Image (spheres, rainbow, N blue to C red):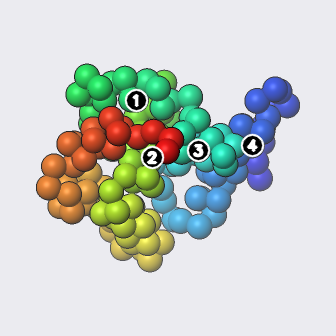
Amino acid sequence: MVLAYRSRQLEVDLRHECTHALLHASLPLVPLWLDEGLAEYFEVAPGKRAFGNPHLNAVRFGAFWGRVPRLRDLESKSDLSEMKGAEYRNAWAWVHFMLHGSSEAHDELVRFLADIQAGEPPGLLSQRLAGRIADVDSAWLGHFRKWKRR
């Protein structure tokens, strides 16, 4: 069941909440930051997901100055009350990186979710990414510094 308040943001809210519903119907557990990052990603209309998310400009500005949100900080969040605007933006940014950045990051996200679905302990995605990408922070920065519509 998905509940949403009827407002001008109804379509956005429905996409966000339906993402949560689909994740929780398919997986026995979803780390809070990833649950929210995926919902933030999929809440915008399909044609705007890669380039038109409201978080993109702030993330690119931070990347310009060399700021990489710490995935370990997001992974430490266990209660929704710990998620504020910056955490939602940072979770979205890591999801964007894994969906549109390096193929290794995308592959690791897919493997991480597959392990959860199979009932295998997935470990921390930050550690898994660090094991696949020599300097994951540099890869993240490079992704957002170069990301633009072609």
- Please tell me which of labels 4 and 3 falls first in the chain: 4
- Callouts 2 and 1 close, C-beta under 8 Å: yes
Q: CA separation, marks 2 and 1?
A: 11 Å
Query: Which residue position holds label 2?
Result: 96
Q: Which amino acid, mark 3?
A: Arg
Q: Nearer the viewer, mark 4 or mark 1?
A: 1
> Outermost residue, bottom direction?
118
- Please tell me which of labels 3 and 2 falls first in the chain: 3
- Side of 83 relative to 140 (left or right): right
Q: Residues within 10 Å of mark 3 (few under 14, many from 20)?
A: some
- Please tell me which of labels 2 and 1 falls first in the chain: 1
Q: Nearer the viewer, mark 4 or mark 3?
A: 3
Is residue 91 something one can see in this rendering? no
Q: In front here: 138 or 20?
A: 138
Q: CA separation, marks 3 and 1?
A: 14 Å
Q: Which amino acid, mark 1?
A: Val
Q: CA separation, marks 4 and 3?
A: 15 Å
Q: Nearer the viewer, mark 2 or mark 4?
A: 2
Q: In front here: 33 or 52?
A: 52
Query: Which residue position holds label 4?
Result: 14
Q: Which amino acid, mark 4?
A: Leu
